[in-house]
Image: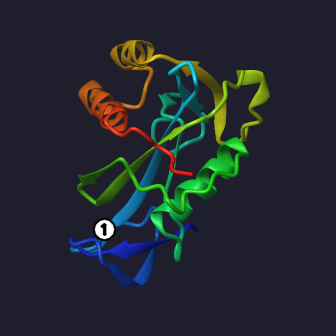
Amino acid sequence: MELVNTYNVERQRLTQTTDRHTPLAPGEYIVIVHALILNTNGEILIQQRANDKSLWANLWDISCSGAPIAGETSAEGIAREIKEELGWSIDFDHIRPILTANFDHGFSDYYVYQLDKSLSIADIQYNTQEIQAINWVTMPEILALIEQDKFVPYKPSFLQAILACAEDFTEINPT
């Protein structure tokens, strides 16, 4: 069981928690966090989801995603998910989501993180229980995977909008 915070429609935290996979009561919402990690070549790290995932098994996805556990903030949740899935410790205390999207049962926070160096796939020690494979790709390559139904079903314009928002900021990751 994975306990998560619940929120009202105004995103104010409610006092009760719930299992992430339990249907929510009317007026209850959860937060999901996502990260797009970019290298110095402008490529995006993508992951192929494990074959035993309940949603989108075997499909490619953006760099990292998950749900903050009960008591965590959005920033703490994405930092923990990146640590669990990719083994990296990244401080998100001063990084806000580049975009928040509403969905039927909650809020999805999207973070963009720019690495300050280029890493080869061989240098990344990812969690093989959650991820089958990882790869650095360009946005056109992601769009091709979406077209081939090999990527989590994002709208291409949505992913492009996230990157466009990130480009509008001169400094994605403050020091």
Q: Residue at x 77, y 35 (%)?
A: 125
Residue at the location (39% across, 52% down)?
Answer: 97
Q: Is 118 left or right of 137, judged from the image as shown?
A: right
Query: Is residue 154 in view from this perspective?
Result: no
| Residue 72 horizontal side relative to residue 106, left or right | right
| Coordinates of residue 133 in the picture (x, y in percent) | 65, 26
Task: Report the front residue among 153 and 52.
Answer: 153
Nearest the viewer among 169 and 126 is 169
The relative height of residue 43 versus residue 89 in the rendered view (above or below) is above
Q: Secondary structure at mark 1?
A: loop
In the rendered view, how is the structure colored? rainbow
Tell me what residue is drawn at x 52 percent, y 21 percent: 43
Q: Position of residue 1 (x, y in %)?
A: 58, 68
Density class for disc 1 (Cα within 10 Å; few <14, some 14-19, many ≥20) is many
Give 14 or 87, whichever is nearer the viewer: 87
Q: Front-most of 40 and 70? A: 40
Taking the image as shown, residue 123 lies to the left or right of residue 117, namely right
Q: Position of residue 27 (x, y in %)?
A: 22, 74
Q: Amino acid at mark 1?
A: Tyr
Residue 86 seen by the camera: yes
Q: Horizontally, is 98 left or right of 51 in the view?
A: left
Q: Name the residue beneath numbered marker 1.
A: 29
* Image position, residue 88 (x, y; %): 70, 46
The vertical placement of 53 against 3, above or below, is above
Q: Quadrant of residue 78?
A: bottom right
The vertical placement of 168 against 141, above or below, is below
Say which quarter of the image contains residue 39.
top right
- Name the residue: 62% across, 48% down: 82
